[in-house]
Structures are given as structure tokens and as C-alpha cells.
Image (cartoon, grey):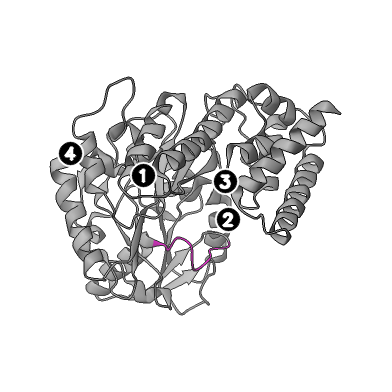
Amino acid sequence: MRIALIDPTPERRRERLYPIGLLRLGAYLRERGDQVELFTNRVPSEGIFDEAWLSVVFTYHIPHALGIVKKLDGRVSRVRVGGPAASLLPDYFTKTGAEVHVGRLPEAESFAPAYDLLGFDPEYSIARMTRGCPRKCEWCAVPIIEGKFTQHEWVGDLDVRAKRILFYDDNILALPARKLGPELANLRALCDAGTVQTFDFNQGLDPRLVGEKDGKQQPGAVEKCDAFAKLPLDPVRFAFDGMHEDGWVQSAIRRFAQRGHANFMSLVLYNYEDAPRDMYHRLRALQQTSSDVTDELGRWVRCQSVPMRYSPIDRVGRDRDYVGQNWSVDLLHSFRALANGHAVTGQISTDTMEEFEYWFGQDADEFVRMLRYPRIKELAEKRKLFIRGLRAKLRDEGRGNRMDLARELVAVREARANA
């Protein structure tokens, strides 16, 4: 059987996330005796392949994937569609005549990914120590897709050519300390041997399982932190999904920083049950933690924020038009304009509290006023150009460090207040 494996993700970049499901599926099909080839966002010519198998990851990619399915009409005799999006919303594909596989394919789960299907040497390996998550967050699709939380064999999934690992665990810290310790010890051995140089749990760690709040902590929290000590985890990603994690995140960052980590990235969910004031509080709390821990340890500790706009899992298409109960269309657009003005990627990373306040306000009231400003895009652009010029001026004067910039921004604010 000749089978085309199609990744229908629009504008897939080779250095980003590889279609791990298709790579694992390709290894299984080869073992079965089939001939396979990977196609990224394109379809094969007519008559070359007997079947086409697609894996659709995100529900907002469904319209694009449906276009790929339509192009396959007449080119292959059978189309099969799977992946998280198809498992969540199968009806979109069944009405096209395609066969839909809901859930995981157990036959393929034991196979290591066939990285050679990529057509280039992988820059990283993809692995999982665990699958699923014991929490039942209403906004999350993981419990629906993955089911019960389980441990997973992972060392065999690594490609020897890649020195970096992306772990796709949904909640690795849900492993008890007595099980997590040996897993990280295996990882440490690979790092010590030079097989692995760095790794990343890119779904975000659960801060409530390693932090402390109001004198309370989960059993094994400290032991789990110790297991990560000085491992080349870069960045350390924590979830900051809502105010219920306030305090836990700051404590988790501090504990990991005390054990040698310096680069933190928090995934900050908004547009769910939060309000703009809540968003400001969380963004400021992360910057304050960066400043406090930097002072405490005497070395630079960076805490970046990655705003993640919530949209219900049954929404398809790129418009992402859902508006949370405490937001509005204008507020959402304004926040995105402000974040994009600060950084093209939308990530929020400032060196000092003074720089944070320059961009997002001294308090929640000022932040909300900024979001309601009718020409917020112009304001963001002016601030970007101003701070870029100020940085250049300070460098020319030999005063280019972060504290020099902080002092200048304080002076600017005071001058405006006295004007």
C-alpha cells in the first residue's frame, strides 16, 4: 500500500513543531509493509498513492484541512483523518466522505517517530514521559483527547542527531516524586553523556505541584524541585492560567531559580473567566518576581510572559472571535496591539519594573485606561520608537545596562507628571 501522510498545518515552519503523530504513524505503517511519504501542507499528484492520512492538531486549522481533503478528491481512493482536532470535532470531516479516527491509534503508540520522513536532520527530538493530566480544567481538551494520566516510555523516541528534546507532557509534575526522580535521573545521565544538551517541557509545568502558598504545599513538592536542580531545562515554562495560581507561580519560580535556573516563561491564559485587571496583576507579578529573585540571588533571572488568548475548543477558523464575559472586542484588540508593540512575537519580557510600567502602566487602573485609549496602536508604536531611541542613546553614552534604562524611564515619567 502506498500511503501519503499529510500535515495540513498552514505555514508549518521546519524549526517549529514537527508532526509527531504522523512520524510515529509512518514508522508503524512501514513495519506493516506500506510505503509512506510525508507531505507538509500539500497534496500528492493523482495516481501515485493509494491512500492519504491526515493529522489535524488545532480546531482552528479545520477549515484549511477541509480544503486539503477536497483537493485529495480523485487523487487517492481513501482518505483517513485523525489528530486532536478531528477527535474533538469529527463531524466536519465525516460529511466530506473521509474516514475519521477518534482518539489515539494504539497500534502506532509503541513505535519511535520516523524522523527521516522530515527530509532533514531534526533539530530536536520529541518525547513524553507521561500522557494526560489528572486535572479537569473546563477549558482544556487534554482530558478529552488523552484520557487517564499514564506514564510513558520515552528514551527510545530520541533521535541521536538531535541534542535538544521537546517534551510534550501535559502535566509531568503530576508524577509522584518517587517516580519523577528516576525519570529525571535518566535525563540527567543523557545530559552528562553529551547526548542531550538542553530540553523543554513546552506545555508548561503546574506550579501548584512544586510551589508553596500560605504555608501549604503538595506532598513531594520540594523533592520535585530538587530533581530538576541544575538540569539544562531552557526555558522553564510554568502555566499561569488564572488567579487561582497566583502565589504558586511566584513560589515555583523562586524555588527553581534557587536551584540554578534563570530563564522562565509563563503561559498566561486570558479571555476566559479573568478580567483585564486580573491580567495586569499576573503580568506584574511575574515581573516583580523577576526583580525580587534577581536581587535575592545576585544574578539575572528573567520571567517572560506569553499571553494565550482563550477560545472554546468547538470554534473553528482563524478569526478566534470568542469574547470572554469580562472582556470586549475593543479591549482584546487593544491588549494585542500593546503586546505586539512591545514585542513582535507578543511575548512580554522587560528587564525591570520601571520598563514594565512604561509599557503597561503603574497599576491596573492605568492599564485599563490604556486599553480604552482609541489610538492604542499609535501609542504603542510611539512608545516602541521612543524606547528604541533611548536604548541607542544610552549605548552611545556607555550607559547601556538595564538599570540605566530604568533610571531614565523614571525621569521621563516624573517630567511628564510635572509638566
Neighbours of disc 3 within 10 Å: few (<14), some (14-19), many (20+): many
Image coordinates of residue 296 in percent, x first then y, are 41, 38
Which callout, 1 or 2, points at the residue further toward the start of the chain?
Answer: 2
Residue displayed at 55% across by 55% down = 66
Which quarter of the figure is the N terminus placed in? bottom left
Residue displayed at 58% across by 41% down = 352
* Mark 1 to mark 2 CA distance (whole Å): 42 Å
**In the image shown, does 100 or 23 lie closer to the viewer?**
23
Q: Which residue is mark 1?
A: 257
Q: Which residue is mark 3?
A: 351
Neighbours of disc 1 within 10 Å: few (<14), some (14-19), many (20+): many
Which callout, 1 or 3, points at the residue further toward the start of the chain?
Answer: 1
Which callout, 4 or 2, points at the residue further toward the start of the chain?
Answer: 2
Q: Is residue 142 left or right of residue 223?
A: right
Q: Amino acid at mark 1?
A: Ala
What stretch of residues is rendered in magenta? 11-19
Q: Which residue is mark 4?
A: 176
Q: Is residue 400 visible?
A: yes
Q: Are marks 4 and 3 in contact (CB under 8 Å)?
A: no
Describe the element under mark 3 as helix, strand or loop. Answer: loop
